[in-house]
Image (cartoon, rainbow, N blue to C red):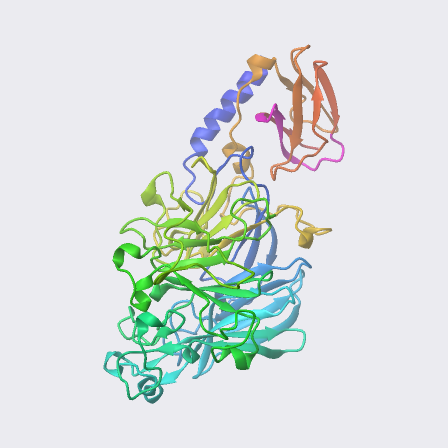
């Protein structure tokens, strides 16, 4: 028992020291965290990384140094990776450029071979921010499209407010990589209303036209990037698209079951309303309803249907999730609400003059509210174990939160201006911009048969035992008279405990995967064959509590 106590004391001492980690893995409670692999595509560098929960790289899709995120990447079930990127020189000198600008979407296989590519980047259009993949493996992309001063005038825009004498409203383009064809389009410009000039197009009563977009609603001081749509998602079950429109502080839902021709008008599709907005929520002031007290969204990011890697039994399944960037002067929130779609009537709740509901179902805050604040970027993911993964983009800080508001995993992107940094370096706002961080389940189809051996941390000169030192252990040695030996072990490890006591025993790796079948024991001693275990740290759980660790070292 003296040796065990010494090991425990050493671990607690090291934990105290490593609690001061400044980058990379900051904390990790393996007993409460959702196991999985984390996809990260940080700004100011070209590569897409897949990390385990210890923050170690298990796979990387590299690119040349002249490329930058544009801004999202996803892993498909077959192992293909799809990413958006842009040239490092695509800045303010480009004809169409604003924050979040992209240019190219690529489909690459697991080994980084290029399968298909699409580019939209010229004086008339530019891809930007986000894209999403449909069940047919087509890709829905957000695109800025140029509207000249003359076109804006004819549409009923008060052109005196256009500082640059042009607008870049958003459209959605659907690309089929298999055929390299555009198969569907939707344009905001086809669904406008205005009450400024009765001699121009789109004249009407804004308050009576919530399905239309007021061409004179503008919180961007006349900048051409009028909408700045920054996220898009697709719901296959109902053939719906949701997109985030942060300058309107809204989520919009449109009907994807339309043809391109129907999407340009107000009839057709399952909803019978063509490409008009089926639903909008977050700020009814955009259609002259309500007041500031009715506003719920504030420059939102990552609006999406909550369904990734979840089953219908999850209480949040099918609802809408969002990162609410500017809800407070010094804090942000992550939120979930139920849009209450009636699939039989193909409509959303509309109570008198506003779309419902009245409020969120759930508001998530960091335990220290001001530790979650990002004026842009950022993401929310609902995990299968009921936890929430939240990324604060401008600080490159991601944490996993339990329903009881406990942080059980934290990671800080270890990059300053594109260069990886060392442990102890302190990063400031915008040093390590991270658009989004997504966690994929360990049993995701893409990972089957893949080599996911940890290759080391992104942190320069990081301690390989960092994860071990940050993973808390509960000392139940006295209660169970627990001993684990030898430690380090080779091909066999022995666990002993007080005879006569029933214990539920699990042995896990640091991703939370069971190395042996969980078992109930009471004999006081159990031998475990570890000949198939690779070198590393393993966790012992007794009665669902992590109580000890051992190392395999050959």
Hey, which quadrant is residue 367 in on the image?
A: top left
| Residue 24, horizontal then vertical, whole percent | 47, 45
> From what the image shows, is residue 203 above or below residue 399?
below
Q: Is residue 325 visible?
A: yes
| Residue 217, horizontal then vertical, whole percent | 30, 72
352 on left or right of 348: left
| Residue 377, horizontal then vertical, whole percent | 41, 58
Q: Is residue 168 visible?
A: no
Camera-side residue of 238 and 125: 238
> Looking at the rendering, in which quadrant would you find the C terminus?
top right
- Who's the residue at 69% across and 59% down the image? 78
370 on left or right of 487: left
161 on left or right of 260: left
- Who's the residue at 45% across and 58% down the image? 302
> From what the image shows, is residue 416 above or below residue 492?
below
Instruction: Specify start and end residues of the magenta stretch as a single range.
Output: 530-546
> Looking at the rendering, in which quadrant would you find the N terminus?
top right
| Residue 463, horizontal then vertical, whole percent | 52, 39
> From what the image shows, is residue 30 above or below residue 476?
below
Camera-side residue of 47 and 443: 443
Hey, which quadrant is residue 492 in on the image?
A: top right
């Amino acid at each position: 028992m003296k040796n065990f106590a010494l090991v425990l004391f050493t671990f607690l001492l090291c934990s105290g020291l490593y609690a001061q980690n400044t980058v990379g893995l900051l904390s990790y409670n393996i007993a409460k965290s959702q196991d999985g692999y984390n996809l990260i595509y940080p700004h100011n560098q070209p590569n897409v990384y897949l990390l385990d929960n210890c923050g170690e790289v298990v796979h990387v899709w590299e690119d040349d140094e002249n490329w930058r995120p544009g801004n999202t990447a996803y892993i498909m079930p077959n192992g293909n990776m799809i990413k958006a990127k842009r040239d490092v020189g695509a800045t303010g000198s480009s004809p169409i450029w604003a924050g979040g600008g992209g240019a190219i979407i690529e489909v690459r296989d697991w080994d980084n071979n290029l399968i298909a590519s699409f580019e939209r980047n010229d004086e008339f259009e530019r891809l930007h921010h986000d894209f999403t993949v449909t069940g047919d493996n087509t890709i829905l992309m957000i695109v800025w499209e140029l509207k000249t001063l003359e076109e804006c005038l004819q549409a009923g825009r008060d052109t005196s407010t256009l500082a640059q004498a042009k607008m870049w409203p958003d459209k959605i383009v659907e690309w089929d990589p298999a055929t390299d064809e555009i198969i569907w389009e939707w344009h905001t410009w086809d669904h406008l209303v205005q009450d400024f000039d009765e001699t121009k197009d789109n004249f009407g009563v804004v308050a009576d036209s919530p399905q239309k977009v007021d061409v004179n609603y503008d919180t961007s001081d006349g900048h051409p990037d009028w909408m700045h749509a920054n996220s898009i998602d697709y719901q296959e079950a109902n053939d719906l698209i949701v997109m985030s429109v942060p300058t309107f502080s809204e989520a919009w839902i449109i009907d994807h079951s339309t043809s391109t021709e129907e999407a340009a008008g107000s009839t057709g599709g399952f909803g019978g309303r063509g490409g008009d907005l089926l639903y909008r929520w977050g700020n009814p002031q955009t259609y002259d309803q309500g007041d500031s007290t009715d506003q719920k969204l504030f420059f939102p990011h990552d609006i999406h249907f909550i369904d990734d890697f979840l089953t219908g039994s999850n209480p949040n399944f099918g609802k809408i999730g969002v990162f609410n960037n500017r809800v407070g002067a010094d804090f942000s929130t992550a939120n979930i609400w139920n849009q209450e779609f009636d699939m039989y009537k193909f409509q959303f709740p509309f109570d008198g003059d506003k779309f419902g509901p009245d409020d969120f179902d759930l508001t998530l805050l960091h335990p220290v509210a001001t530790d979650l604040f990002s004026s842009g970027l950022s993401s929310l993911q609902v995990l299968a174990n009921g936890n929430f993964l939240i990324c604060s983009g401008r600080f490159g800080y991601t944490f996993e939160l339990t329903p009881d508001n406990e942080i059980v995993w934290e990671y800080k992107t270890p990059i300053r201006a594109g260069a990886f940094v060392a442990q102890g370096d302190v990063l400031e706002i915008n040093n390590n911009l991270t658009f989004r961080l997504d966690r994929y389940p360990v049993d995701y189809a893409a990972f089957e048969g893949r080599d996911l051996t940890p290759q080391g941390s992104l942190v320069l000169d990081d301690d390989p035992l960092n994860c071990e030192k940050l993973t808390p252990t509960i000392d139940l040695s006295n209660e169970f008279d627990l001993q684990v030996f030898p430690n380090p072990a080779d091909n066999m490890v022995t666990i002993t405990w007080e005879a006569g006591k029933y214990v539920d025993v699990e042995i896990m790796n640091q991703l939370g995967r069971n190395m042996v079948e969980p078992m109930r024991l009471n004999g006081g001693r159990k031998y475990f064959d570890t000949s198939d275990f690779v070198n590393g740290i393993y966790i012992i759980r007794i009665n669902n509590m992590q109580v000890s660790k051992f190392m395999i070292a050959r």
